[in-house]
Amino acid sequence: MITLGIEGTAHSIGIGIVKGRNDSCSVLSNMIRTYRPEKGGIHPREAANHHVTYIAELIKEALQQAHIPAQDVDLISFSQGPGLGPCLRTAATAARALSLKLHKPIIGVNHCVAHLEIGRGVLPECTDPVLLYTSGANTQVIAFAEGKYRVFGETLDIGIGNCLDKFGRSLQMPFPSGPRIEQLAKKSTNYLELPYSVKGMDIAFSGLLTAAIHYHKNNKPLGDICYSLQETAFAALTEITERAMAHTEKQQVLLGGGVAANQRLRDMVSIMANERGARFFVPEKSLCVDNGAMIAWLGYIMYQSGVRMEIDDTIINQRFRTDQVEVIWRD
Ligand code: ATP
Ligand code: FE2
């Protein structure tokens, strides 16, 4: 069965085509285009305008790369939430139009659950992980328990990616700043004290961000600040992930979200997993960031388990919570 997935929760518009056979996922194409504001943060309407501009040609490119005609698509899925209203509406409108034109069923999916399911889909040994989902807007520790994906811990203020990007923006670094901060951090091992906020299994970053900006204003070496920012934030993320693993007694950990590209974060979580005798998984980068393939894959497994939607059921949900989804495709 071939599914075309449309991702459009925030600044990326993605079209992914996957072929599913039982539990096995093969990604036929996965095209992503990202809106980059000239200055400042993301303006939801401008991001949506970007998506409107590129979505039709991206669908064509994805079909071409997958070497299939549009008629061979069996199912259309799209990111129903959570995310920015104008962006979500753009993806949903395109999905509805495709579904009606091709006379194919449509399924709206939860974006956060898709980040987890794509890891299970492409990494067959990753069966029941705790997901550390770290992106721009989201920072959550998610795992399956009693019929649902539950959020065991999350940020109480901003996402980790946002924290890195805001720090970068205060120094006029280009967006997104995460990769640049990673490079700068490699130049130092000199730790500067920063606030560490873990509250149970939740986490907060704004105090850390303010303190890092303050160090910069006081002319501390940039490498030292980037190094200390990463060490502090990633240690805290690793700690809440370990706590969720201990609590749920799960033996696997999976990374997802754009910040999972960071080698230092990967190293820290992988060391923690090794020390617990647990296994560490991370999908390739194009499947960690916001992408259409993960939306297609989740649409496929939901459809396989019997989920059906009419156009009336495809209204977007900006605050679609991870634990609102009935996970009927798992025991
Ligand atoms: P979501 O809508 O799920 O919150 P998003 O729109 O923020 O996702 P992603 O592509 O998942 O999109 O993540 C982007 C974030 O990842 C940015 O904040 C960026 O700075 C960060 N990032 C990318 N590469 C790295 C890296 N090497 N190190 C740290 N952060 C990184
Ligand atoms: Fe995401």
Image (cartoon, helix red, strand yellow):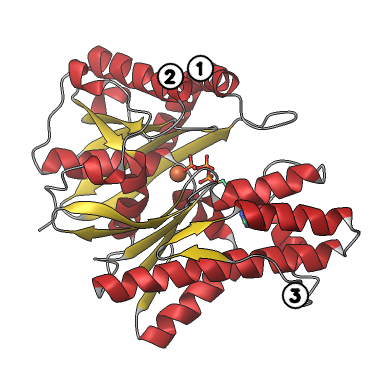
Please give the label number shown on residue 90.
Answer: 2
In the image: residue 235, left or right of residue 142 = right
In the image: residue 160, left or right of residue 321 = right
Relative to 193, is 121 above or below? Answer: above
Q: Amino acid at mark 2?
A: Thr
Ligand 2 positioned in quadrant: top left
Q: What is the quadrant of the N terminus in the image?
A: top left
Give the residue displayed 89% in from the left and 58% down from the top.
218
Residue 103 coordinates in the image, percent (x, y): 19, 17
Please give the label number shown on residue 191.
Answer: 3
In the image: residue 278, left or right of residue 327 = right
In front of the other: 123 or 246: 246
Give the residue displayed 33% in from the left and 65% down from the top.
130
Q: Amino acid at mark 3?
A: Tyr
* Residues at discs 1 and 2 in contact (Cβ within 8 Å): yes
Relative to 59, is 220 above or below? Answer: below
Residue 155 coordinates in the image, percent (x, y): 47, 52
Label 1: how many Cα within 10 Å (few below 14, some 14–19, many 20+): some
In front of the other: 306 or 25: 306
Give the residue displayed 28% in from the left and 31% down from the top.
77
Q: What residue sits right under mark 1 in the picture?
A: 52
SS for callout 2: helix
